[in-house]
Amino acid sequence: MAGGVLVLLLAGAVTAWLLNRARLQRLKESLELRNKIAADLHDEIGSTLSSISLLSGLTEKQIINNQPQKAEQLIQKISQDARQMLESMDDIVWTINPRNDSMSTLLTRLREYAKPLADSKEIELNFVVSPEAENSTLILNVRQNVYLIVKEAINNLFKYAQATKAEVRFEKKGKNLEVVVKDNGVGFDSNGMNNRNGLKNMHERATTMGAKLDIDSNPENGTVLSLLISG
């Protein structure tokens, strides 16, 4: 009898411990998510709002000084910054939405971003996705960084590569996921890490999620970006 009671008490204690542990884990994940959102909002939006505020003050001075052309240039810059801020906010909201965990959702968003750019530049763009990759599920941190790295690579491709063909490929290699973005454009010196192409940011994002990022490019020989995410 006593033994049975002890077993029940022990089982109850273990169950309570497991439930408390799960609760603490959820609280930890919730806190990490809140901190991440706050950091993203500060980095992506705070600086842009400061810039818009400064430019607005300068625009007012140009108008007072009867310099409409300079004022118009500043207004165009404000409009551009505002559009970029709205795009950044949309990306943040999208990446933290749990309904967007699937790879298919990420791929749909990337296609929707890339297709109009490809059409405007008359670039033949192909998405190649293996069935195993299509069925993958990505955690929030990985999903956000994969999306932003590939988006940045696509954006750079259309802005600078002068390519006629490009490919975005997702495939599973064992437990790992490999993402490749390549083009047949003019290329660049990949040893010169320049801010214009956002290469530093891409490498930092890869490091954040424990992935390996390689960029192979040479003038006149196109560019191949390879991102390997451990499973």
Image: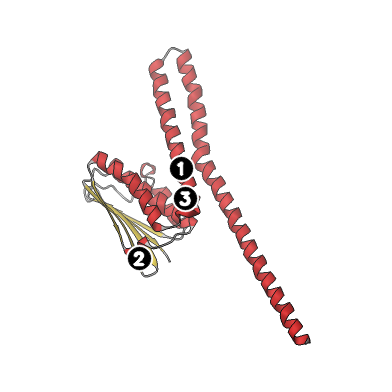
Q: Residue at x 39, y 51 (%)?
A: 149
Q: Residue at x 49, y 24 (%)?
A: 56
Which residue in the structure is indicated by mark 2? Answer: 132
Please indicate, yes or no, whether residue 223 appears anywhere in the rendered image.
Answer: no
Please indicate whether residue 31 sits to the left or right of residue 191 in the image: right
Which amino acid type corresponds to the residue marked 2 in the rendered image? Glu
Q: Which mark is residue 90?
A: 1
Q: Which mark is residue 95?
A: 3
Above or below for 7 versus 49: below
Which amino acid type corresponds to the residue marked 3 in the rendered image? Thr
Q: x, y percentage for residue 142?
A: 45, 57
Q: In the structure shown, which secondary structural element does the residue marked by tag 3 occupy? A: helix
Nearer to me, 109 or 37? 109
Q: Earlier in the sequence, mark 3 or mark 1?
A: 1
Q: Earlier in the sequence, mark 2 or mark 3?
A: 3
Q: Earlier in the sequence, mark 2 or mark 1?
A: 1
Please indicate whether residue 84 sits to the left or right of residue 50 in the image: left
Q: Residue at x 52, y 45 (%)?
A: 40
